[in-house]
Amino acid sequence: MTTTQTHETEITVDPDVPLVRITREFDAPPEKVFRAHTDPALLVQWLGPRGVEMKVDHFDCRTGGSYRYVHTSGGEEYGFHGSFHEVRPSEVIVQTFTFEGVPDGVALERLVLEDLGEGRTRLTATSLVDTFEGRDAFVASGMEYGVREGYERLDELLAR
Amino acid sequence: MTTTQTHETEITVDPDVPLVRITREFDAPPEKVFRAHTDPALLVQWLGPRGVEMKVDHFDCRTGGSYRYVHTSGGEEYGFHGSFHEVRPSEVIVQTFTFEGVPDGVALERLVLEDLGEGRTRLTATSLVDTFEGRDAFVASGMEYGVREGYERLDELLAR
């Protein structure tokens, strides 16, 4: 049995712009954290809360690529899609993100991985939308719970 | 000789979020304005101020596609690239946009075409970034001049 240390996930809303910022450390090097975000076979093992089944429609994680996946929970399907604006291996992913339940909504997201040395990584993920109402509704929707539990699952995957 | 009526281009900065909004009417139906934005052979004839030479590297204007083009002016090259998050013919284009002179900067842009009837279209283009400083530097950079002159060139193209 693997014992996994769980780090704290910080989720903060920016006071000046309609942006959410998530920071989290992982006990794995950036290369490994990056691969867990870009290889669909790994992504389906951790993205989202426990009990959610994830199916990848397509996931072409390179600059200029695009993606779509579906979460199934309690018989309901939730689709998500977007484009990869820029992908720099083990460093940065800039992408768009739409939850298909709100088809005209779109967020601009940036994931940054920082090498802390000794096989550790700090992840910073920001999500920018065009209204404070939209940002606050997103945070109030329970994303916090899904993000925290997803990262616990990622800890477990990285420890294998 | 074709006489072209030139409409006013309104460029406003949002007071609450780091967004620029451009509105402009055209004496052409949405289908024609859309095609001028998506067909690279037409785009190079109007995008940017007069005297700029535009070369399209690639321009795959469909949901999930990407683009890159280069403006040449006074011997200097200015590259731009991004991804198309969503393209709905004659209605909406949502895309990312990076000026390669500021490689880590990225804007989330939305173009909306509204059919005003009688062969007229209202275009609304918004550009969202993550800081007010970045937004205000973009506006101060002279984009206003390039946008107005580009739309005058587009009027001429649509009138042909």
Image (cartoon, coloured by chain):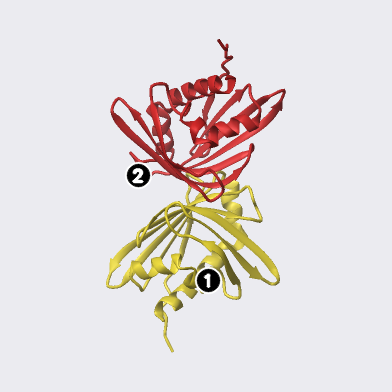
Chain colours: A yellow, B red
Up/down of B102 relative to B119, above or below: below
- Residues behind callouts 1 and 2 on a single chain: no
Image quarter for residue A156? bottom left
The residue tagged 1 is A44
Q: Mark 2 is on which residue type?
A: Pro
Residue drawn where x is 64% and y is 51% of the image: A103
Seen as rendered, the residue at the extreme bottom is A1
**Residue B96, numbered label:** none
Residue drawn where x is 44% and y is 58% of the image: A125
Q: Nearer the viewer, residue B134 or A73?
A: A73
Up/down of B55 relative to A94, above or below: above
Tell me the SS state at disc 2: loop
Chain letter of mark 2 equals B
Q: Mark 1 is on which residue type?
A: Val
Residue drawn where x is 49% and y is 75% of the image: A153
In the image: residue B139, left or right of residue A45: left
Chain letter of mark 1 equals A
Image quadrant for the C terminus of chain A? bottom left
Q: Are marks 1 and 2 in contact (CB under 8 Å)?
A: no
Tell me the SS state at disc 1: loop
Count residues near mark 2 (Cα–Cα under 10 Å), then give few for <14, some for 14-19, many for 20+. few
**Residue B103, numbered label:** 2
Image quadrant for the N terminus of chain A? bottom left
